[in-house]
Image (cartoon, rainbow, N blue to C red):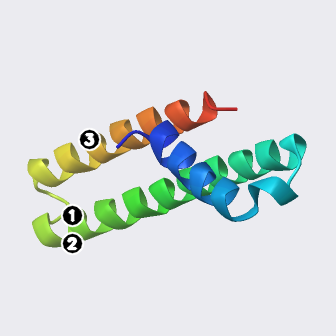
Amino acid sequence: MKADKITEKAMKKVKAVAGKDLSKTQLEELRIILADLAIDIASETAKHCAKQTAKLFGPKTGLAADIADEIKRSKIALVTNLESLR
């Protein structure tokens, strides 16, 4: 699922619980907070996956480097996607 869809899904849940009690400004600030949180989670997950890949395949294995590079590319794409939500 794309990051913007995840953020919007979370916002629908927030609006269902507290939407009537929050102003449009507060809802927008909350959407930004959720997008930033998704970026942080994706970043930490990517770091964890890269470390685990290196442990499993060893630093001299080309496959580990290829997987780590793919994780980095995916992270960059996710961060770019989330930043476009702002």
The residue under the point 55% across, 43% down is: 8
Residue closer to the observer: 70 or 54: 70
Q: Which amino acid lies under the numbered mark 3 shown in the image of this protein?
A: Glu
Residue closer to the observer: 34 or 69: 34
Label 3 packing within 10 angstroms: few (<14), some (14-19), many (20+): some
Say whether disc 3 or disc 1 marks the residue closer to the N-terminus: 1
The residue under the point 65% across, 50% down is: 36
Picture mark count: 3
Q: Which residue is mark 1?
A: 53
3D distance between C-alphas at marks 2 and 1:
5 Å
Under circle 1, the secondary element is helix
Label 1 packing within 10 angstroms: few (<14), some (14-19), many (20+): some
Q: Which residue is mark 3?
A: 70
3D distance between C-alphas at marks 3 and 1:
12 Å
Residue 53 pos. (x, y %): 21, 63
Label 2 packing within 10 angstroms: few (<14), some (14-19), many (20+): few
Residue closer to the observer: 80 or 12: 12
Q: Which residue is mark 2?
A: 55
